Image: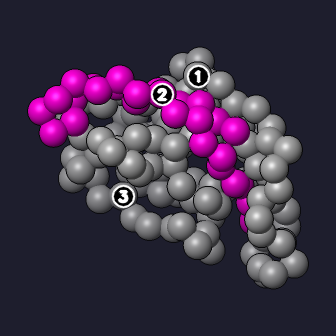
Amino acid sequence: MLVGGAGAAVAAVGGWFVFLRDSGGGPEGVVRSYVSALDSGNTEEAESLVHEDSPSSKELDGSGNLGENLDYSVESIETSDAGPGYNESSYETVQEFETLEVTTRVSGTVFGQERDETSTDTVVLAKNADDEWKIWD
């Protein structure tokens, strides 16, 4: 998923501070929107971008457990050659999967310490029955 690790490193999403709602932006637009929602502290919006049947689905509680004053941004997004590791025929609510390599930067204060971390992660997205791309894993 896109959140996890020491000091709440974000695992993937993005693009140069141009955050888009998925209005034709496809999988990359969803990732950008997710990071934008995290950056603005809008956990409800972030949760809405996760596929309803995702095995990684979990609620973000918005209680600040992601750190204090964190800034989330996307450095790059590339289509991955790696397969998603899932088969859409195994899920009634998935039409297809897309795999992206996302480099994300998180900076700010985590448990009283300044952090500035960049990580590249594989993000799997799934198109649901309503033709909407959502974060799967």
Which numbered disc, 3 or 1, marks the residue that appears first in the sequence? 3
Main secondary structure along the magenta-highlighted residues: strand
Which numbered disc, 2 or 1, marks the residue that appears first in the sequence? 1
Verify whether residue 128 appears in magenta.
Answer: yes
Label for residue 75?
1
* Residue bearing mark 2: 118
Q: Are marks 3 and 1 in contact (CB under 8 Å)?
A: no
Where is residue 53? Give x, y as percent: 62, 74
Q: Residues within 10 Å of mark 2 (few under 14, many from 20)?
A: some
Which numbered disc, 3 or 2, marks the residue that appears first in the sequence? 3
Q: Are marks 2 and 1 in contact (CB under 8 Å)?
A: yes
Q: Residues within 10 Å of mark 3 (few under 14, many from 20)?
A: some
3D distance between C-alphas at marks 3 and 1: 23 Å
Label for residue 60?
3
Where is residue 124? Give x, y as percent: 70, 54
Instruction: Report if residue 111 is visible in the image.
Output: yes
Q: Give the residue displayed 65% in from the left and 49% down from the top.
A: 123
Tell me the element at label 1.
strand
Lateral position of residue 48 relative to residue 30, left or right: left
The magenta stretch is: 101-130
3D distance between C-alphas at marks 2 and 1: 8 Å
3D distance between C-alphas at marks 3 and 2: 21 Å
Q: Give the residue displayed 12% in from the left and 33% down from the top.
A: 112
Q: Identify whether 55 is placed above or below 70.
A: below
Query: Which amino acid type is shown beneath numbered disc 3?
Result: Leu
